[in-house]
């Protein structure tokens, strides 16, 4: 069942849980994500990240996601993840994506606000919902340390609640991704999360909040983030790692020379990893 981002976040808000967003970089990962959600009877968000467009163009993977969502037995939002260009946001909207994340967080505040408002107006006119980002994950590109390592002053990257309130009011977005200590990719050490930032941003904006860099956070960390107001959790790296390791084991076993056997092994492993994540996000 294809639904909008706001619709799926309302389910999470009513249950005081978080809905998982998982990137679908190809047919096997799309099947894994929706299959996991159906087995657990939980809503899910399947997403295409602009950075993954080099592997499968949105014109190919987007229709596959939408078809899978429409056929699913559970609510599914088809979402553009980290749309950093207006062009990619518009391409997703024209295809029928029901959620758009415009990520202009690397830009100065005023430019982030202007581009976010532009995309939000266009998306709302086409019946889609919008997620934006304010604050920065501690990546090297943002002035942080190496991938997965905690910066010396993580608070320098946090979302400021007062700014978040003004930003959301002026842009009209439907959800906000905030920075409170997570990072993309694989963690070198357990991240230090500031749940006070989450609570303050939730109170200031009144919107569902989004946690990026979800892979590698402890179950207790997820529970505390959800209790503070997180309603959407982005999870990809460890799902992809599970698929990679299963594929590698299948190849190393020497039991097959067929790619489809390797792909199926990756699919099964990704589905099980997604199920584990959904269970945690659902408070099980």
Image: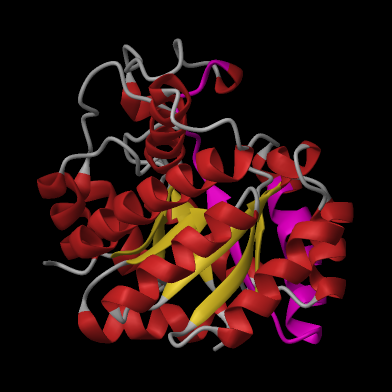
Q: Is residue 117 magenta?
A: yes
Residue 175's spot in the image, x, y percent?
50, 68
Residue sitting nearer the eye, 20 or 266: 266
Q: Is residue 275 above or below residue 16?
A: above
Q: Is residue 57 above or below residue 44?
A: above
Q: Is residue 184 above or below residue 139?
A: below
Q: Is residue 151 above or below residue 18?
A: above
Residue 2, visible in the rendered structure:
no
Residue sitting nearer the eye, 22 or 179: 22
Question: Left or right: 221 with respect to 201?
Answer: left
Residue 138's spot in the image, x, y percent?
45, 25
Q: Residue at x 35, y 35 (%)?
A: 182
Q: Residue at x 44, y 11 (%)?
A: 145
Q: Residue at x 69, y 54 (%)?
A: 113
Look at the image and give the residue range highlighted in magenta.
112-140
Quarter of the image where the C terminus is located: bottom left
Residue 144, visible in the rendered structure:
yes
């Amino acid at each position: 069942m294809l639904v909008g981002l706001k619709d799926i976040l309302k389910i999470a808000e009513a249950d005081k849980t978080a809905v998982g967003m998982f990137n679908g970089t190809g047919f096997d990962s799309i099947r894994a994500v929706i299959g996991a959600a159906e087995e657990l009877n939980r809503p899910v968000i399947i997403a295409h990240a602009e950075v993954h467009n080099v592997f499968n163009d949105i014109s190919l993977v987007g229709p596959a996601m939408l078809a899978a969502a429409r056929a699913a037995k559970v609510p599914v939002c088809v979402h553009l993840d980290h749309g950093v260009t207006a062009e990619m946001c518009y391409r997703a909207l024209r295809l029928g994506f029901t959620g758009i994340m415009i990520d202009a967080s690397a830009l100065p505040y005023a430019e982030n606000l202007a581009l976010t408002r532009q995309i939000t107006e266009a998306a709302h006119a086409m019946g889609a919902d919008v997620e934006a980002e304010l604050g920065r994950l501690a990546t090297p590109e943002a002035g942080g340390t190496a991938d997965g390592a905690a910066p010396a002053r993580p608070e320098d990257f946090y979302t400021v609640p007062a700014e978040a309130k003004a930003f959301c009011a002026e842009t009209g977005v439907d959800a906000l991704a905030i920075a409170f200590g997570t990072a993309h990719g694989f963690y070198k050490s357990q991240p230090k999360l500031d749940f006070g930032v989450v609570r303050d941003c939730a109170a200031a904006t009144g919107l569902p909040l989004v946690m990026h860099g979800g892979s590698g956070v402890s179950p207790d960390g997820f529970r505390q983030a959800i209790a503070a107001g997180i309603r959407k959790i982005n999870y990809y790296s460890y799902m992809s790692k599970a698929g990679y390791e299963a594929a590698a084991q299948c190849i190393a076993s020497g039991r097959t020379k067929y790619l489809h056997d390797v792909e199926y092994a990756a699919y099964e492993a990704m589905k099980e990893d997604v199920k584990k994540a959904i269970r945690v996000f659902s408070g099980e």
